[in-house]
Image: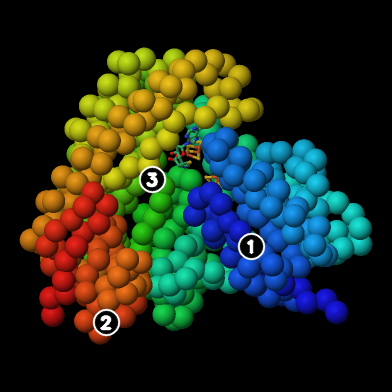
Amino acid sequence: METNKLFIETYGCQMNTYDSEVVLSILQKSGYTICEGIEEADLILINTCSIRDNAEQRIWGRLDLFMTEKKKRRLYVGVLGCMAERLKDQLLSHPAVDMVVGPDAYRELPKIIALVKAGHREVETTLSTSETYADIEPVRMDKNGVTSFISIMRGCNNMCTYCIVPYVRGRERSRDPHTIVEEARTLFNAGYREVNLLGQNVDSYLWKDPNNPTESTNFAQLLELVALVSPDLRVRFSTSHPKDMSNGVLYTMAMYPNICTHIHLPVQSGSDRMLEKMHRKYDVAKYMERISKIREIIPDASITTDIIAGFCSETEEDHQATMKLMREVGFDSAFMFQYSQREGTVASKKFPDDVPLQTKTRRLNEIIEQQSAISLECNRKCIGNTYRVLIEGTSKRDAGHLFGRTLGNKVCVFPALGHKKGEYVDIKVESCTSATLLGYIVE
Ligand code: SAH
Ligand code: SF4
Ligand code: F3S
């Protein structure tokens, strides 16, 4: 008898997490139920990331493991997401793979699975200019039931020269705001207390009503609509782009106490020459102007960033410029990477990947080390202050402690005192590490 048990494994960014929930929703309607381990599964879907080479290497390793499972019993394996889109039928060269389905083709999954069960191997990677899955209510797979994601747009039009995303996610398109607000409301009614609005460049969100082209909604307006769902629903968003982040968004953030005081504003490099070569369309002066504006309008905002070490032709001077910018801004935290050349991007065609691996790694380590000191310094400034924290769950280290986040996205750990996830508490910070604030509940 067919049992139809599905196991989904998700890699990459929050968009993939969201997409896996869309996929589960689609497949539940055709009779699949989710299971906890690959041993139980009849169908394994792996939602993949192509952003750096090591992300892809990890997936190949997983496919090898699925192959050993496949030898034991009847099992189908599908590759979804960005690597599916990038490599298409090349993925069929792996014996574990029965189907390859790109990020805009998930509605086709029931059909594709039926074909696979009939003995075919299928590849569907057509990208769309309109698909936003707006009408699909994702089936949530988060563990906490408190915080969740909502995808507000798909694709990216920016063409940063190092980046594979525009090739694997297609053109940028925004989702109907009414469906976004409805989704936020549904989450709130189900007990969720935080939504994170997702897009590769949320500042370029723009919805034009197809029935009334004079009606449009920009990101600041969308943020307000979601903030109005309930004052008890926290609203986060990512990612902001320095070239597009408007004062309008900052004023909206300042106006609603439930919009989180955190901006993730990837800088990538502190060298104008590198920024130009990366095609980021801002320079250091413009970036610093955006930082001042954030600090002026939202004085207690947390600012986080992404940094790439060792991009094509990066010199020691360029690297030092990045180190300097990091100190000047004083980022609360950062995601830091070494440049990984991606086939097909403008950089891979035009610029030699000429910074030796050893140099990339050394620069990255310097960046990480410096950031850790800066993060610690930022967190130390929080000691003695009291913050409203949304409880997300039990601390991994100590069952008697809970953890949650401040409006500024800082993780706080504190003794539970009978409180539970989903509640708001005020936490007085007593001490900290570079990654966590430690404190206690003040009633
Ligand atoms: N849309 C977001 C980020 C998407 S990818 C933005 O524009 O900021 C997340 C991060 O991965 C990027 O900010 C960048 O720092 C990093 N990244 C992207 N391509 C990379 C590459 N080829 N090598 C190393 N890091 C990369
Ligand atoms: Fe990639 Fe740039 Fe688009 Fe971000 S904005 S996803 S870095 S192309
Ligand atoms: Fe990776 Fe695709 Fe996200 S390449 S970072 S999963 S958009």
Q: Residue 197 in the image: x percent, y percent?
A: 44, 58
Is disc 2 surrounded by few (<14), some (14 to 19) or many (20+) residues within 10 Å?
some
Q: Residue 308 in the image: x percent, y percent?
A: 41, 31
Vertical comparison of 24 with 162: above or below: below
Residue 248 falls left or right of residue 187: left
From mark 1 to mark 3, how far is it between C-alphas? 29 Å
Q: Nearer the viewer, residue 164 or 431?
A: 431
Q: Nearer the viewer, residue 191 or 157?
A: 191
Check contact, mark 3 vs mark 2: CB within 8 A: no
Residue on which disc 2 sits: 419
Residue 8 - label: 1
Q: Quadrant of the N terminus?
A: bottom right
Q: Nearer the viewer, mark 1 or mark 3?
A: 1
Tag 3: residue type?
A: Ser
Tag 2: residue type?
A: His
Q: Residue 67 in the image: x percent, y percent?
A: 75, 53
In primary-sequence order, the first of circles 1 and 3 is: 1
Instruction: Tell me which corner region of the image, top left, top right, bottom left or bottom right, holds residue 441.
Output: bottom left
Q: Would residue 221 be seen by someone viewing this image from the given angle? A: no
Residue 240 - label: 3
Q: Nearer the viewer, residue 425 or 150?
A: 425
Kindly identify the residue that appears in the image at 31 percent across and 49 percent down: 263
Residue 354 falls left or right of residue 370: right
Q: Secondary structure at mark 3?
A: loop
Q: Ligand 3 shows up in which quadrant of the image?
A: top right
Kindly identify the residue that appears in the image at 35 percent across and 66 percent down: 396
From mark 3 to mark 2, how far is it between C-alphas? 34 Å
Q: Nearer the viewer, mark 3 or mark 2?
A: 2
